[in-house]
Image (tube, rainbow, N blue to C red):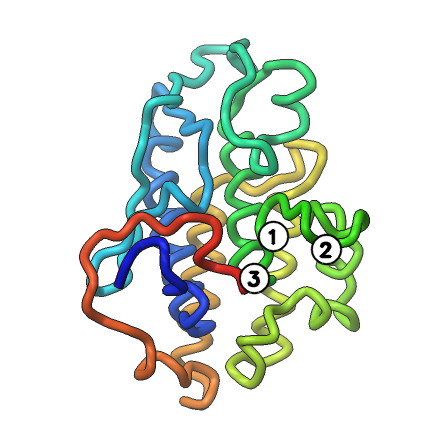
Amino acid sequence: MNARGSHFQQLSWSLRLKIAVGAARDRAFPHSTETKVIYRDFKTSNILLDTNYDAKLSDFGLARDGPTGDKSHVSTRVMGTHGYAAPEYLATGHLTAKSDVYSFGVVQLEMLSGRRAIDKNRPSGEQCPVEWAKPYLSNKRKVSRVMDSRLEGQYSLTQAQRAATLSFRCLSLEPKYRPNMDEVVTEQMALVLAISMDSPSTSRGDADAPKKFAYPRPSASLLYA
């Protein structure tokens, strides 16, 4: 299937989470080394998938070495993609590993909601999904308002709440309140395991998803209607 087609629109709940786990893992290792490498351009269109839906990140052209020793950040010219960059990085140019965590939170929110990081075609209050979704991500009774309608019937409320809570933490305005990428991977894997142990109905739709493709580059448009 062409990478610019509607592939992501057909992905089930469990496959979307599998992709999120793979992308988080790919970012966690560079964050765990002594000299952290900060990706700086974590976004949906930089996630490549193989035939098993295993995710890898591409395009490391904006990657930077992170702070060393007792330094809290590195200062750099603001670069990246609008809608994904952490607010403190945009405001100050101060880059940390938590900047990537924020960007991951945006990517996961896209997968949950089926909305682009920036969508000028939506009403003014909904063009930025982070601003629109935050009040719902933190409210267990309203989290269903965030979920992509194409996923209806594929997840339990508990699963949606756990995924939404993780996104909410990653999207914290204060970097110190965001989890690190190892914590993100641990929580994502626990959620995937919980899905596998639930009723098969929570992962239905996988059999209908196309299987024959090799490392397409999903663009942001592929996840959305």
The answer to which of 23 and 47 lies nearer the viewer is: 47
Q: Earlier along the polypeptide chain: callout 1 or callout 3?
A: 3
Give the class, few, some or many, for how many residues have Cα within 10 Å of label 1's Cα (few <14, many ≥20).
Answer: many
Kind of residue at disc 1: Ser
Callout 1 touching callout 2 (CB < 8 Å) = yes
According to the image, label 1 marks what residue?
167
Q: Earlier along the polypeptide chain: callout 1 or callout 2?
A: 2
Give the class, few, some or many, for how many residues have Cα within 10 Å of label 3's Cα (few <14, many ≥20).
Answer: many
The answer to which of 120 and 167 lies nearer the viewer is: 120
Callout 1 touching callout 3 (CB < 8 Å) = no
According to the image, label 3 marks what residue?
114
Secondary element at tag 3: loop
Q: CA distance from mark 1 to mark 3?
A: 14 Å
Q: CA distance from mark 1 to mark 2?
A: 10 Å
For discs 3 and 2, the disc positioned in front in the rendered view: 3
Q: Up-down: is 13 above or below 119? A: below
According to the image, label 2 marks what residue?
133
For discs 1 and 3, the disc positioned in front in the rendered view: 3
Q: Where, quadrant-wise, is the C terminus in this rendering? A: bottom right
Q: Position of residue 10 (x, y in %)?
A: 41, 72
- Residue at 79 percent across and 72 percent down: it is 141
Q: Position of residue 6 (x, y in %)?
A: 40, 64
Q: Earlier along the polypeptide chain: callout 3 or callout 2?
A: 3
Quadrant hosting residue 18: bottom left
The total number of labels drawn is 3
The answer to which of 125 and 78 lies nearer the viewer is: 125
Q: CA distance from mark 3 to mark 2?
A: 12 Å
Give the class, few, some or many, for how many residues have Cα within 10 Å of label 2's Cα (few <14, many ≥20).
Answer: many
Secondary element at tag 2: helix
Kind of residue at disc 3: Gly
Left or right: residue 14 compared with residue 99: left
